[in-house]
């Protein structure tokens, strides 16, 4: 095996690397979203809060279920729950049936944040559709869902 030749081949595919593209898109999206959210009056917001906030059901979500949905440890989730509670975005209540468990709810401020965030990204997603075309955008979303489901099956 010629290491230099193999390495040269790898370099040719950098621009089309799934992992690299995903990473770059995520970084650009996070920067854009954070700026939009800050412009809308949420200057104390961190993008790391998004996986938590977007996974809280209207009827509340338990700590364990939220950690699972956000794909983080319960310890990491506990830290974010404390921060979001201090910001007045969520509230924590004891579970009505299982007193060992807690249920997390969005406050009115939290609900307003989720609405604002959704409005912000809706505009960006409309731009994406204009850039690649609505059909290709939907194909991309469908493909991403399939890849995510594949990884979720691997993680079980």
Image (cartoon, rainbow, N blue to C red):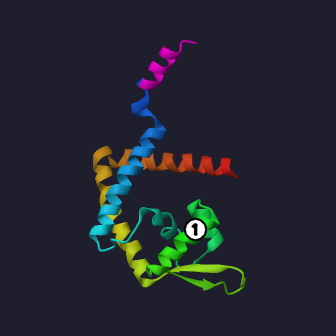
Q: In the drawing, does residue 23 fall left or right of residue 134?
A: right
Residue 116 shows in the view: yes
Find residue 154 and report its horizontal and vertical position in percent: 67, 47
Q: Is residue 12 above or below residue 4?
A: below
Q: Which of 133 and 86 is in front in this view?
A: 86
- Which span is picked out in magenta? 1-11
Q: In the drawing, does residue 125 fall left or right of residue 107?
A: left
Q: Nearer the viewer, residue 147 or 14?
A: 14
Q: Quadrant of residue 110?
A: bottom left
Residue at numbered disc 1: 77
Find residue 132 and report its horizontal and vertical position in percent: 32, 44
Q: Residue most toward the top?
A: 2
Q: In this view, does 141 lie above or below 1?
A: below
Rendered residue at 44%/39% (across/down) = 20
Q: What element carries label 1?
A: helix
Q: Which of 63 and 46 is in front in this view?
A: 46
Q: Quadrant of residue 17?
A: top left
* 8 in magenta: yes
Find residue 126 and report its horizontal and vertical position in percent: 31, 56
Q: Nearer the viewer, residue 71 or 140?
A: 71
């Amino acid at each position: 095996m010629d290491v230099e030749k193999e390495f040269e081949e790898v370099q040719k595919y950098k621009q089309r690397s799934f992992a690299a593209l995903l990473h770059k898109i995520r970084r650009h999206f996070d920067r854009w979203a954070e700026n939009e959210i800050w412009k809308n009056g949420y200057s104390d917001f961190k993008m790391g809060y998004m996986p938590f906030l977007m996974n809280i059901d209207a009827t509340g979500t338990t700590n364990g279920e939220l950690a699972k949905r956000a794909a983080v440890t319960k310890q990491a989730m506990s830290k974010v729950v404390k921060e979001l509670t201090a910001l007045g975005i969520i509230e924590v209540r004891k579970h009505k049936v299982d007193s060992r468990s807690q249920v997390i709810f969005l406050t009115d401020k939290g609900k307003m944040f989720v609405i604002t965030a959704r409005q912000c990204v809706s505009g960006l997603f409309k731009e994406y559709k204009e850039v690649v075309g609505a059909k290709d955008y939907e194909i991309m979303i469908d493909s991403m869902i399939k890849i995510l489901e594949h990884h979720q099956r691997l993680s079980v």
